[in-house]
Amino acid sequence: MADERYAVGELADLGGVSRRTVRYYVHEGLIPPPLGVGRGDHYGREHLDRLLQVKALQEAGRSLDEIRQLLDGGGPAARPVVAEARPLPREVWRRLTVAPGVELHVSGDVRLPSPARLQELAAWCRLHLNGRDNTEEDDA
């Protein structure tokens, strides 16, 4: 369809973002302002394409400032980049607080020890990592 028209909510849904994000991107100049005025304002296919382009660049790890420069500069990234964008690898990690100010990060594919062993580790951390310099004790 050559005359596609989207309300802000429809554009947001199609782009996988919130209405607030669409409005923010317009305010920041990442996507053009809507066509029309007042209650008749709407977005077209070019808005959706730009929104998807911005989202793909973000998922590729670009900051909004970098995206703005790329899109405004007309450099190589100004052409559609949906094929270039690769989602960042995601991993599940567990975070355990073992002492005040000390955390243990454990990959989701590593089996945790028993709660009793974790308590032993936490006690060791509280004893040895309490914020004071233990080098004098280690030398003795």
Image: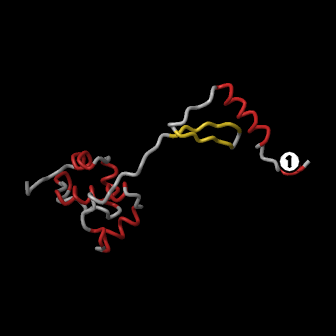
Residue occupying the point 27% across, 55% down: 52
3 relative to 131, above or below: below
Residue type indicated by callout 1: Asp
Residue 104: give x, y in percent of width and height: 63, 40
Residue 53: give x, y in percent of width and height: 28, 59
Residue occupying the point 30% across, 68% down: 77
Which residue is the site of mark 1?
A: 138
Question: Quarter of the image containing the N terminus?
Answer: bottom left
Q: Quadrant of residue 68?
A: bottom left
Towards the viewer: 32 or 123: 123
Q: Please indicate whether residue 122 sits to the left or right of residue 21 in the image.
A: right
Residue 133: give x, y in percent of width and height: 82, 50
Callout 1: 10 Å neighbours few (<14), some, many (20+)? few
> How many numbered markers are drawn?
1
Residue 137: give x, y in percent of width and height: 88, 47
Towards the viewer: 40 or 88: 88
Towards the viewer: 113 or 53: 113
Q: Quadrant of residue 110?
A: top right
Residue occupying the point 42% across, 49% down: 89
Q: Secondary structure at mark 1?
A: helix
Q: Please indicate whether residue 99 sits to the left or right of residue 109 in the image.
A: right
12 relative to 74, above or below: above
Q: Quadrant of residue 48?
A: bottom left
Q: Residue furthest right?
A: 140
Residue occupying the point 30% across, 60% down: 84
Q: Please indicate whether residue 62 sits to the left or right of residue 22 in the image.
A: right
